[in-house]
Image (cartoon, helix red, strand yellow):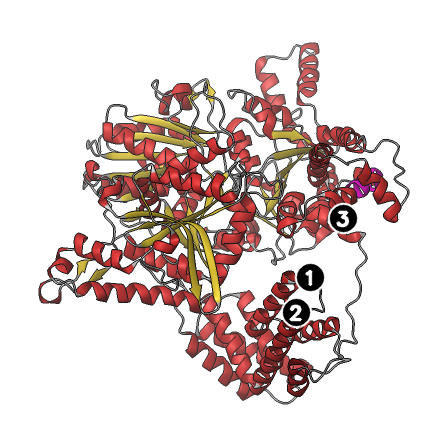
């Protein structure tokens, strides 16, 4: 018996889903044509069953189905199916109405029974295998599709569990880069997609990059063995694909937002957010325990967790329309949380601007989602609301929430539920997060826990690496304290004298802020940033002692790197100089602009200098290096350094902390309450350097006696002979993987130079023996950009030929070739001619499709005679279509092509925040440019400046499109086509 993706993985998932009460119907037996997205008979039946108005007049069902078809068809006109997916989700979740009531009154249209969602019999569920969907000549077959009431809510792809070259990544890439792009209409009703090879299981949403697809794990009881193989798949399928879970994802655990480039994106909850939300809701429903502590490591999505929880709490019938209050302890956190909730379009949301507004809302028994800061409880006049269906979710549950403000908050809402969410709980003296938020019923004091190790294992966050710098000016605080004590004893100083001197002459502050030291460290930061951070396309944060030191570092970095590279962000104080207030203390809107610039890879702002602001509530995936020159303790330290741990695919592998004060030991102390998992998360760069040479030696040990100076086939044959067995290849692959990961982490450390020859040799040998299935995608995801760059440095690339016009293929020549009248054509030359023609029209969709056809043709005949009759015939057909496409392209006036390019550009910008009428924008730009241009204007400075000025006025002033990238792209099209 053999094992393959069908019998060992696909059918296993199918049977697991069937065991939950879901009906199985094979793809070929479904009541649909291959061009249908919906099972319309089942959709119609659900509409009649769930809507009394439609039940009374079943013809109304056709009106709804017509609306749904229109949305599905719209996906074929846009490269981003998320837009149509969001609109369709509104129908699925009962947010749409039709005039079906008495007198044409609008009534809600129900497509799904959510009230009994966990019961498979409440809706018509089907699991299908091998579902074919075809649009024109494009056809795709999906391994698994889960249908609810005729809607394909889940698509799954399986790979073989016994082929080492395949993984879930290949399955996910197939969905993300092939299915969604080539048959987007099928993904309009999609809730989620999943990928598995029988060893791991990952799920994601439409448009989500594969690097962000998440696993599903159930919390272990501490005694059960860790699942592996198909047990992992069983756990995930049971958790993700159960009917109730799929509908929960659809209704509560999916968000739509717009990214910085004005593209619509879809976010789906990770398992820790899904599970924590259900734990909170369950606790509130039972009403016995009134609090709980949720510890999810920094960067793993606590803000989104609060959004998901608020949505589910507000919709849970047993809670009778509760009030949900999100409490933060800093203004910047307030801004971050409010922005997250607003972007998610949570209904009945209000962000309080004053103590009075908060008190009025509570006194009136407001049933909303309220976002506030803990400080607004400071002047609360005793009890504000005694209701028991008030749920407080306290972000960063420590610091001020455990002091007077926290006490006032509890007094104001004595019967409220209190849930603390934190990434850095502490358990020392009077600041005891566990005491104030945890419950004795919860093991370890946590209602939900998602640790450092968990978040890194799942790819939710990245590891942190420390790099100590400038040991010659390292400040040993303990030695300074000891020396001061000796001085004080020698002169018999009183306690008062000691305190005064400590605050002045002998303080750590005085040494840290010394001008000479600031100059040295600023110079080191500039050198380090230029060599190790900027070349990778990442950015940095400098954390310094206080506000005057921020300004001092800014002056030094300006001198070294230029004015535009860095800025200071700090809070405003009444005694601050006016210059600081004008330059470095931004209000909320200006801060938002600064952080947006920082997150833009193309913006010259690359370094932000801070002392307190932006050490919490600052989410910047592009932030890679943090230069720490400030003594930080406990949660402040952990909050700060975890700014760098956000995922930034595909090249960011870790966050780097450059340590100028020896804070690594303090980090270990700050994590002391945990079970040492921090030791597996935070690694010292020095330790990694020490690991590289032994790892290289272990990999080279597979080649005893092999002369690595011998090149060519002679050297490679000997190297490969040392790996003759599959066991040897696998063992070498594992050893090489360790080397590659260390190399990626340390690069571009200068110490790598001495090992470069060995690493390059090992990489070449590894490349020569690794499996080549699936176009090497798995290896691409594993190796990383820096290793690939190193390989590319030592690969000779042939210059593209310039003599590909040696044969001319026109309509007559092609006809002669097709009919056999012309016998002397070289297939290789025909193929090169087609390639050259296609390359001249990069970006034209017609030629993109021709290029895809050429690649498919090459793959089809890769192992056959290239001169075979069938190959020649298909090649000539492609050549004929290429000539036709060139003729069609030539018939379109240049300026019409310009209008088409501008239309596509502004269509991509249109969204909720910029509801532009694209046709009006394009017409206005076209008219303005035609009015001011003249022959050869692109080659004159005045002409180019005139067109830029008029374009800027049109976009920025008339249509309020403040997007520099859009301006530059539009200008490029105008220069090309006008």
Examine the rendered structure and indicate whether residue 138 appears above or below residue 572. below
Label 1: which secondary element: loop
Q: Nearer the viewer, mark 1 or mark 3?
A: 1
Q: Mark 1 points at which residue?
A: 864
Label 3: which secondary element: helix
Label 2: which secondary element: helix
What residue lies at 67% left-to-right and 28% top-to-bottom?
662
Q: Which of marks 1 and 2 is nearer the N terminus?
A: 1
Classify mark 3: residues with Cα within 10 Å, few (<14), some (14-19) or many (20+): some
Asked whether the beta carbons under mark 2 and mark 3 sit within 8 Å of each other, the answer is no
Q: Quadrant of residue 861?
A: bottom right
Q: Mark 3 points at which residue?
A: 790
User: Separation of disc 1 and disc 2 at Cα?
Assistant: 9 Å
Q: Residues in magenta? A: 754-762
User: Separation of disc 2 and disc 3 at Cα?
Assistant: 37 Å
Q: Looking at this view, is 444 or 124 the one in front?
A: 124
User: Separation of disc 1 and disc 3 at Cα?
Assistant: 34 Å
Asked whether residue 760 is drawn in magenta, I would say: yes
Examine the rendered structure and indicate whether residue 853 appears above or below residue 930. above
Give the image location of residue 188, x and y in percent.
38, 58
Give the image location of residue 8, x and y in percent.
49, 39
Asked whether the beta carbons under mark 1 and mark 2 sit within 8 Å of each other, the answer is yes
Q: Looking at this view, is 19 or 67 the one in front?
A: 19
Give the image location of residue 270, x and y in percent.
43, 40
Q: Earlier in the sequence, mark 1 or mark 3?
A: 3
Q: Is residue 415 visible?
A: no
What residue lies at 38% left-to-right and 39% top-to-bottom?
15
Classify mark 2: residues with Cα within 10 Å, few (<14), some (14-19) or many (20+): some
Q: Magenta stretch: dominant SS?
A: helix
Going by the image, does 174 lie left or right of 335? right
Q: Name the residue under label 2.
A: 871
């Amino acid at each position: 018996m053999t094992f393959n993706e069908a019998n060992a993985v696909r059918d296993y998932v199918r049977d697991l889903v069937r065991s939950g009460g879901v009906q199985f119907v094979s793809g070929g037996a479904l009541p649909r044509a291959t061009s249908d997205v919906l099972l319309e008979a089942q959709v119609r039946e659900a509409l009649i069953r769930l809507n009394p108005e439609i039940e009374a007049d079943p013809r109304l069902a056709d009106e709804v189905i017509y609306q749904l078809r229109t949305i599905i068809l719209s996906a074929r006109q846009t490269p981003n199916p998320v837009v149509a997916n969001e609109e369709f989700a509104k129908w699925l979740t009962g947010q749409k109405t039709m005039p079906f009531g008495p007198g044409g009154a609008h009534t809600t249209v129900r497509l799904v029974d959510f009230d009994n969602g966990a019961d498979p019999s409440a809706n018509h569920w089907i699991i299908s295998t091998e579902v074919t969907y075809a649009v024109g000549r494009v056809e795709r077959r999906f391994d698994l599709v889960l249908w609810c009431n005729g809607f394909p809510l889940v698509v799954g792809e399986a790979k073989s569990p016994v082929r080492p070259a395949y993984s879930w990544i290949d399955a996910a890439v197939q969905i993300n880069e092939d299915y969604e792009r080539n048959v987007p209409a099928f993904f309009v009703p999609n809730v989620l997609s999943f990928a598995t090879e029988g060893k791991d299981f990952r799920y994601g949403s439409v448009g989500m990059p594969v690097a962000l697809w998440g696993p599903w794990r159930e919390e272990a009881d501490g005694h059960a063995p860790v699942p592996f193989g198909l047990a992992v798949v069983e756990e995930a399928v049971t958790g993700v694909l159960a009917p109730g879970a799929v509908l929960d994802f659809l209704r509560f655990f999916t968000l739509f937002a717009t990214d910085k480039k004005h593209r619509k994106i879809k976010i789906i909850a990770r398992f820790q957010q899904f599970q924590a939300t259900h734990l909170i809701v369950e606790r509130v429903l039972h009403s016995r325990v009134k609090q709980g502590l949720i510890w999810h490591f920094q960067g793993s999505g606590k803000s989104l967790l609060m959004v998901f929880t608020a949505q589910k709490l507000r919709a849970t019938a047993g809670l009778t329309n509760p009030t949900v209050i999100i409490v933060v302890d800093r203004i910047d956190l307030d801004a971050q949380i409010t922005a997250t909730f607003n972007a998610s379009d949570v209904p009945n949301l209000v962000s309080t601007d004053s103590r009075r507004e908060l008190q009025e809302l509570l006194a009136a028994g407001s049933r909303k989602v309220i976002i506030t800061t803990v400080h607004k409880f400071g002047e609360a006049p005793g009890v504000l609301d005694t209701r028991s269906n008030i749920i407080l979710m306290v972000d960063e549950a420590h610091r001020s929430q455990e002091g007077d403000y926290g006490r006032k908050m509890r007094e104001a809402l004595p019967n409220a539920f209190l849930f603390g969410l934190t990434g850095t709980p502490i358990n020392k003296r009077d600041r005891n997060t566990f005491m104030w938020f945890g419950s004795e019923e919860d093991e370890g004091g946590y209602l939900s826990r998602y640790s450092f190790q968990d978040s890194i294992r799942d790819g939710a966050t990245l590891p942190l690496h420390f790099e100590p710098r400038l040991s010659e000016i390292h400040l040993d605080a303990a030695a300074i304290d000891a020396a001061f004590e000796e001085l004080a004893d020698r002169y018999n100083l009183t306690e008062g004298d000691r305190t005064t001197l400590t605050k002045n002459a002998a303080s750590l502050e005085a040494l840290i802020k010394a001008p000479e030291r600031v100059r040295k460290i600023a110079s080191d930061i500039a050198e380090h940033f230029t060599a190790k951070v900027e070349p990778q396309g990442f950015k940095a944060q400098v954390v310094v002692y206080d506000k005057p030191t921020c300004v001092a570092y800014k002056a030094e970095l300006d001198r070294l790197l230029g004015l535009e590279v860095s800025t200071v962000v700090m809070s405003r104080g009444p005694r601050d100089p006016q210059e600081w207030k004008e330059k470095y203390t931004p209000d909320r809107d200006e801060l938002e602009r600064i952080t947006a610039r920082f997150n833009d890879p193309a913006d010259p702002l690359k370094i932000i200098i801070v002392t307190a602001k932006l050490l919490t509530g600052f989410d910047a995936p592009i932030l890679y290096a943090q230069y720490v020159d400030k003594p930080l303790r406990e949660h402040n330290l952990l909050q700060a350094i975890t700014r760098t741990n956000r995922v930034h695919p595909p090249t960011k592998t870790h966050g780097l902390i450059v340590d100028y004060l020896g804070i690594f030991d303090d980090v270990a102390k700050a994590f002391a309450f945990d079970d040492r998992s921090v030791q597996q998360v935070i690694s010292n760069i020095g330790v990694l350097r020490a690991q590289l040479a032994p790892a290289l030696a272990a990999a080279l040990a597979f080649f005893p006696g092999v002369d690595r100076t011998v090149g060519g086939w002679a050297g490679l044959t000997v190297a490969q002979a040392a790996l003759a067995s599959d066991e040897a290849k696998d063992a070498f692959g594992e050893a090489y993987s360790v080397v590659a990961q260390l190399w990626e982490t340390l690069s571009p450390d200068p110490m790598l130079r001495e090992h470069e020859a060995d690493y390059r040799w090992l990489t070449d040998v590894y490349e020569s023996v690794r499996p080549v299935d699936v176009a090497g995608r798995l290896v691409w995801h594993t190796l990383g950009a820096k290793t690939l760059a190193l390989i590319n440095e030592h690969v000779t690339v042939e210059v593209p030929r310039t003599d590909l016009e040696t044969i001319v293929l026109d309509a007559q020549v092609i006809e002669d070739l097709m009919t056999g009248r012309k016998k002397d054509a070289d297939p290789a030359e025909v193929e090169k001619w087609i390639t050259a023609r296609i390359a001249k029209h990069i970006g034209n969709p017609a030629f993109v499709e021709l290029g895809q056809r050429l690649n498919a043709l090459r793959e089809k005949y890769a192992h056959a005679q290239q001169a075979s009759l069938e190959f020649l015939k298909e090649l000539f057909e492609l050549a004929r279509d290429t000539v036709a496409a060139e003729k069609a392209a030539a018939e379109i006036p240049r300026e019409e092509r310009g209008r088409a390019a501008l239309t596509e550009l502004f269509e991509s910008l249109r969204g909720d925040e910029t509801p532009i009428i694209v046709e009006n924008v394009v017409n206005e730009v076209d008219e303005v440019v035609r009015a001011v241009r003249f022959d050869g204007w692109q080659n004159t400075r005045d002409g180019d400046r005139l067109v830029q000025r008029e374009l800027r006025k049109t976009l920025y002033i008339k249509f309020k499109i403040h997007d520099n990238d859009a301006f530059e792209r539009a200008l490029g099209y105008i220069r090309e086509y006008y």
